[in-house]
Image (cartoon, rainbow, N blue to C red):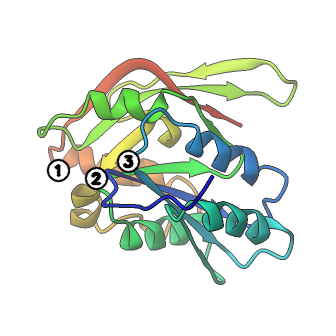
Amino acid sequence: KGLKNMNEPLVSIIIATFDSEKTIRTALQSIEDQTFQEWECLVIDGRSKDGTLDIVKDFSLHDNRFRYISEPDNGIYDAFNKGWKNAKGEWVYYMGCDDKLLREGLKTLIDSATPEYAIISGHVKTLRKDGSMGVWKSVGFWGCHQGKITRLSAIREMNGYNMNYKILADLDFHTRLKNNDYKVLNVDAYIAVFD
């Protein structure tokens, strides 16, 4: 493929990983396959002991838009905070290591972005344990983070995720955005598959 150069990305995709070798390749491939290409991807790894980093390094060797940090952390929200603090994009997209962006996912969100909105939010398809598909609709600030892009400036102003929460720090974060009069635009489109 040859080495791709990264200018300033418009979207920073942040993935928290730990021992994710079974799923990370599919996630990274779905990013590389996006029709929208002005992105960078930061993999924030909690010092995996399996082959996760080998897969991430392989992607970063042929496309320098993939970057990674691997060090012990204090859970997913610590990793998310490290991610936005290292992001270069105007928008931040959080993705699970076992999720998959739909091919038009980022383009759909970016095409709807205008200056008055801090969040552009779409729907996600949910892959259930039995293999069937469900949906997680985006309504107002509420929805799945795999369906949202958030302005980096808004994340900075809210100081990111509150580490006092082991779960639902994303709900706390979106509640703080809402309470501080940030605006969200809901897009009636599917962005990703949430496993």
Residue ID at (47%, 73%): 82
Residue ID at (49%, 64%): 80
Residue 163 visible in the picture: no
Q: Is residue 182 above or below residue 187?
A: below
185 sits to left or right of 4: left
Farthest bottom residue? 71
Q: Comparing marks 3 and 1, which lies closer to the viewer?
A: 3
**For numbered disc 2, what is the local secondary structure?**
helix
The circle drawn on residue 180 is: 1
Name the quadrant of the C terminus: top right
**For numbered disc 1, what is the local secondary structure?**
loop
Picture coordinates of residue 169, whole percent (x, y):
47, 57
Q: CA distance from mark 3 to mark 2?
A: 29 Å
Q: What kind of residue is marked 1?
A: Asn
63 sits to left or right of 139: right
Q: Is residue 75 above or below residue 97?
A: below
Q: What kind of residue is marked 3?
A: Glu
Asked if the residues shown at circle 1 and circle 2 are in contact, with their CB atoms under 8 angstroms apart, the answer is yes
The circle drawn on residue 30 is: none
Residue denoted by label 2: 176
Q: Residues within 10 Å of mark 1 (few under 14, many from 20)?
A: few
The circle drawn on residue 38 is: 3
Q: Quadrant of residue 68?
A: bottom right
Residue 31 visible in the picture: yes
Q: In front: 145, or 142? A: 145
Q: Earlier in the sequence, mark 3 or mark 1?
A: 3
Residue ID at (26%, 27%): 112
> How many numbered marks have been drawn onto this rendered protein structure?
3
Q: CA distance from mark 3 to mark 1?
A: 29 Å
Q: Residues within 10 Å of mark 2 (few under 14, many from 20)?
A: few
Q: In front: 38, or 190? A: 38
Q: What kind of residue is marked 2?
A: Arg
